[in-house]
Image: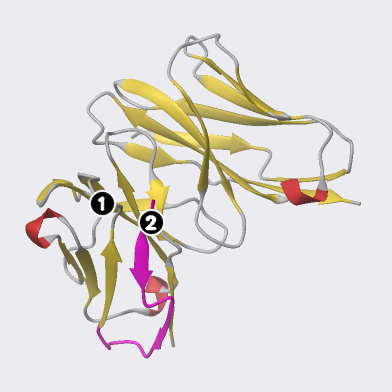
């Protein structure tokens, strides 16, 4: 079974630039999550999709972050414009139910 | 506000030692608690605990949930250097709409 795929693996940008991350969940997994993990902290949920609908985006900074999951499969997370404090690892996870999550390798973002 | 607290935040032991990691939670409509191991990459799943008092085991790792006192422990016996990692616990509610991670416990196992 193929795992959750994410790209790019690393990204370095300057503040005020835009960046987009891509996630391809495990086939058949209806639920998709985006997390932000700042160094030394546990993952923080940004947004949760059930198929292509948003279940929870209460912690997504909507003034600069956006996410979509077209056709209920792949998802993209965008930051525009980026700030220094957005430097983190962005994890995508998928789940067939609201239980065990399978995580992708993450995208490490550095904002200079 | 829902929260998950872990202790200790950092722990250094020697190979062969036994460690106990703690996780306490305050989550509305709590359903399950999950433990993950995170090395230099994304977290990998260890256990999911839904029922109180039932121990789950996998090799040298075991975990149990106390829903009355709102905590869980993760035990690792006969630790090995390969157990060095961050151990995360996360709580999920009944509706699957609230998934809260703790800060993690950084375990270092010295040879």
Query: Where on the picture, by quarter, is residue A74?
Result: bottom left
Q: Residue furthest front?
A: A1
Q: Nearer the viewer, residue A47 or A27?
A: A27
Q: Nearer the viewer, residue A2 or A66?
A: A2
Q: Which residue is mark 1?
A: A27
Structural crowding at the residue carrying mark 2, measured as other residues with C-alpha within 10 Å and reported as few (<14), some (14–19) or many (≥20): few
Residue pictured at 54% horizontal, 21% vertical = B71
Query: Where on the picture, by quarter, is residue A37?
Result: bottom left
Side of A40 relative to B81 (left or right): left
Image quadrant for the N terminus of chain B? top left
For residue A2, the mark is 2
Q: Nearer the viewer, residue B96 or A86?
A: B96
Structural crowding at the residue carrying mark 1, measured as other residues with C-alpha within 10 Å and reported as few (<14), some (14–19) or many (≥20): some
Q: Does the magenta portion include A5?
A: yes
In the displayed structure, would residue A96 be above or below residue B53?
A: below
Residue pictured at 45% horizontal, 12% vertical = B51
Protein image colouring: secondary structure
Q: Secondary structure at mark 1?
A: loop
Q: Are marks 2 and 1 in contact (CB under 8 Å)?
A: yes
Q: Are marks 2 and 1 on the same chain?
A: yes
x and y, in percent, of residue B42 in the image: 50, 57
Q: Chain of mark 1?
A: A
Residue pictured at 27% horizontal, 62% vertical = A24
Q: Main secondary structure of the magenta part?
A: loop
In the displayed structure, would residue A31 be above or below residue B62?
A: below
Q: Secondary structure at mark 2?
A: loop
Side of A71 relative to B94 (left or right): left
Q: Gap between marks 2 and 1, in whole Å? A: 8 Å
x and y, in percent, of residue A23 in the image: 28, 65
Magenta highlight range: A1-18
């Amino acid at each position: 079974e193929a795992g959750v795929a994410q790209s790019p693996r690393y990204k370095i940008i300057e503040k005020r630039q835009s960046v987009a991350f891509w996630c391809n969940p495990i086939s058949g997994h209806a639920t998709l999550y985006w997390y932000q993990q700042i160094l030394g902290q546990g993952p923080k949920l940004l947004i949760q999709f059930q198929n292509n609908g948003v279940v929870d985006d209460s912690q997504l900074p909507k003034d600069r972050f956006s996410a979509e999951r077209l056709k209920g499969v792949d998802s993209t997370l965008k930051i525009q414009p980026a700030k220094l404090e957005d430097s983190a690892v962005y994890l995508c996870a998928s789940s067939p139910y609201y239980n065990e999550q399978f995580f992708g390798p993450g995208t490490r973002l550095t904002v200079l | 506000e829902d929260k998950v607290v872990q202790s200790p935040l950092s722990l250094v032991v020697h190979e062969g030692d036994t460690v106990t990691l703690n996780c306490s939670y305050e989550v509305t409509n709590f359903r399950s608690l999950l433990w993950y191991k995170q090395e230099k990459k994304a977290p990998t799943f260890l256990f999911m605990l839904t029922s109180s008092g039932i121990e789950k085991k996998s090799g040298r790792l075991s975990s149990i949930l106390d829903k009355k006192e709102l905590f869980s422990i993760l035990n690792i016996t006969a630790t090995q250097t390969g157990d060095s990692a961050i151990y995360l616990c996360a709580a999920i509610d009944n509706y699957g709409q609230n998934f809260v991670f703790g800060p993690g416990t950084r375990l270092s196992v010295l040879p």
